[in-house]
Image (tube, coloured by chain):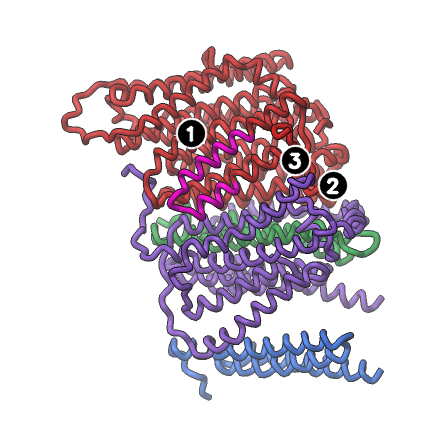
Chain colours: A purple, B blue, C red, D green
Amino acid sequence: MEEIDLLLLFDAVLGFTLVWLAWQTLSSLDLFRAVVLFIAFGLLMALAWVRLDAPDVALAEATIGAGLTGALLLSALAQLSARQKHESETSLFLRLTLGVLMFFLLIGLGYIVFSLPPQALGLSVEVAKNIELSAVANPVTAVLINYRSYDTLLELGVLLLALLAVWSLGSASTRKSAFVNPVLDLLTRILVPVFILVSGYLLWVGAFAPGGAFQAGAVLAAAGVLLFLNDWHLESKYTGFALRSVLVIGLVMFIAIGFGFVFLDRVFLEYPPELAGGFILLIEAAASLSIGIILAALFLGRDPSVKSDSCSDIDTGVHK
Amino acid sequence: MIIDIVTGVLLLVGALFFLAGTLGLLRFPDVYTRLHALTKADNVGLGLIVIALMLQADSWFVVGKLLLIWILILLAGSGVAHLVASTAQKRGLKPWKK
Amino acid sequence: MFIDSPHWITAIILIPILGAVASFLWRQHSVKLALIAATGTTTSVGILSWQVINSGVQRYELGAWNAPLGIELYVDGLSLSMLLVTAIVGFAISIYASAYFRDDKTNFFWPLWLFLWSALNALFVSSDIFNLFVTLEIIGLSAVALVALSGGVDAITAAMRYLLVSLLGSMLYLMGVALLYHSYGTVDMALLSLRTEMIPSMWLIMGLMTAGLLLKTALFPLHFWLPSAHSSAPAPVSALLSALVVKASFYILWRLWIVVFPLNEYARADLGVIFGILGALAVVWGGVKALQQTRLKLLIAYSTVMQIGYLFLAFPLASVMGWKATLYFIMTHAVAKTAMFMVAGNILIHKGHDRIADLYSTVQNLPLTIVAFSLSGISLMGLPPSGGFVAKWLLLEAAVVSGQWWWGIVLLVGGLLTGAYVFKVLGYAFIQEDSNNAPRPIGISKRMEWMALCMALFAIVLGFIAPFILGIIDIGSPFTKGVL
Amino acid sequence: MTPVFLYALVGIVLFSIGLYGLILYKHLLRKILAINIMGSGVFLVMVALAARTEEGVPDAVPHAMVITGIVVAVSATALALALMLRVNEKTGQAVLPEDRET
């Protein structure tokens, strides 16, 4: 009993810290501070996921939510010239009105949450009942890659689309070729192989324990980010078609295997149980490779095959 | 039984190191001394906690993973500390003198 | 055999995705590949509609997992109508864009647009509210990137605003999804429609989801982001956004409203009055603002604000006939507005600007384009025998049947305002002037003129084939609760 | 008060704070952070309430949905940041035109 109370105390402290960090993130005058606090917020979110028995989500949050988002934010901040420190003063009336509205929203949402039955109608029974057929033992992976694999397929689409969208904007500015710190260089040389190893491990372990394609991909992307920080470039002969093929391989493999069994009288995204394990691993391997490279490319922020930055104005075509 | 006690002691001492490191981070006067406090204390503190957890591990595999975590954090921690310090130096932050 | 295959429903999603991937991989052939994908997608929508018309609603369990564990696809008359209009407009815009974008640098248009098409199709056939969230995100991100494609200051800032609005809408919607799942243990629409009940917390869930979707649909007064985004995009993109993208979030809202939310007929009609009033305000406000514009594309964008208003007029009626009118509004507006933005694109390229006051001599140089503008204008005004007329007629009838004839006044006012701004443009376009000192206009591809004309004609033809279309809409009686 | 409801409560507070910040603050980076915080709030509600099962094994479906959500969020954030940099490059400011200080 006492142990539970202690844990509840821990939860309360964690919850309070999360709220405080969120508030500080938004209201701090210095943008750098805001970003750093947000990263801390993400890491504590990962802790909250652990407390909620959601280790898969914790891994995803730590690698993607805090790690890569943090890297993206810091990199964007470094390129941002307009860093005005002070928000212009908004009127007290607006703040008060909005505050009152938020308060009502909070009350309303709180009411919904507390009026829910303490025992849920969720799908945990269904998930467990069919786990044998899904060919993976980790229920979260089973949902992601089998029961609701269609969502995951579209999600790979979202990632690829985001990269396309960022590339279509053209590069804002190239990163200044920074002085390469020897310690960072050494660190990179040690860590990149380790990251690749860990990525493979997460991919493999995802079938029966926390882990999976997204977490593996994110770790791979972290290796990429380290390399970019070391002023590393992909050789130009690989930046064109070869790179693009790697970016799409996850999506294409998913569709190809998902549709492949249609010709054997299955439906789209259905795998025969006896073959499912192998094919799922194949899909996940391709997916995590693509995810890793896409996330790293998002960090780089521009199409490496486009040489100069002269195309500051991409015209709409013929007119103007 | 003895293992449990040892674990407890190690955890406590480890936590103390973390506390000291955090105090140093908050109270020390400049970036270099703060880094010193943070990395030194956290590395040792983490080491003690990792040893404590190793004692409770079910298999050698888990022990290996814990060890790997410690080594990685040592590497990353010291590397990042160096980067922060050298950046601070490049920006011309003078070390604190009494 | 081949044509009877149940898997065509997946083809309408997979073909455009694969087309996007292919046109991304082989950049130098992106136009060709995209046109092939567009043809393939349109064909598979055609085959799917043949199946639905012949053998009724189609259901597909992805991965052979049925709801609530898995995700199901579902096509009834309503989905099919949306798919068809998307295919027609999408195919026309693909052809138009292949002539409009002649620059290598804009070859990102093709993968982005095909992603958008795929997500639109996926959205119209999904019966899973979380899956709908994912499709909404794909639509949002690709639409934002398409707006930013022209790269100017206006376009970039409009895209930024659009992205923030779109993400906010998604978050509100997602909160609703989370609460619905934890209240009823499923995200499947059909199961939800059996389980939801009118408890107090339902009000806030409905409010959150509705607010998020209205924001994305740009119903007055949440339309603030639309005119800048729709007018600063390249013309084919403007057409896509006005014709299809705003309808996607509307479609979700509509389905939720009819099927998922536990409202009885009276409550639905009573709450619908709010939508009706906002819709009426949108019609008047959008019409007046359109009339005030000096740039053609902004005028057309405000016209979209106005036309979105029409879609909400059937909510207080809450009758099958009213809903049919709404669907007819969607289809006619999609086609007519596509034609209008194509016209704007033609004029923009031809004259190098779209200032309405300087449109003189357009009628001599681009006669087909001006004909297209007039015809689509007729349809938007709702004059017989156009598709717009059918939509208005149905709505009027539904309003009279339910004893709320006053919504008819909105239709009348809207028609007059539309007439005013259409004739304003035509008036300037018919002015003749010796253009010796004017900059030499640029000739445009005949394909672009003909596509605009085709779409405009189709908006008229929709009036003639109304019985056929209304028959399609009825398949699976989508407007009756509890059938999904 | 159980951990389930505590975290769900934290989730809705985060959601509201994020919404408040998104509307009120003008700098685009803050708006982007605010949306991310809103998202975290929704995810927390989703996962926290998934622990209300009979057997004590949490429901895996919302967990998977949240992983999907996290990936969608990072994609959107990447695009938003890239757009913000373009706005900054074009206008010299990282705010929307209507929020500019005159």
Q: Return the x and y of residue C264 as percentages of the image width and height.
A: 72, 26
Residue at the left extreme, as displayed? C436
For the C terminus of chain A, the quadrant is top left
**Do tags 1 and 3 sit on the same chain?**
yes
Nearer the N terminus, badge 2 or badge 1?
A: 2
Q: Tell me how far mark 1 sits from mark 3, CA to CA.
A: 35 Å
Whether C277 is drawn above or below A169: the answer is above
Q: Is residue C37 one of those drawn in magenta?
A: yes
Q: Nearer the viewer, mark 3 or mark 2?
A: 3
Residue at 56%, 76% in the rendered image: B26
Residue ID for mark 2: C68
Q: In the rendering, at what x and y percent does residue C353 appear? A: 28, 33
Q: Which mark is residue C73?
A: 3
Residue C302 tag number: 1
Numbered disc in front, either 2 or 1: 2
Dominant secondary structure, magenta: helix
Q: Amino acid at mark 3?
A: Leu
Determine whether, in the image, residue D31 is placed left or right of residue A113.
left
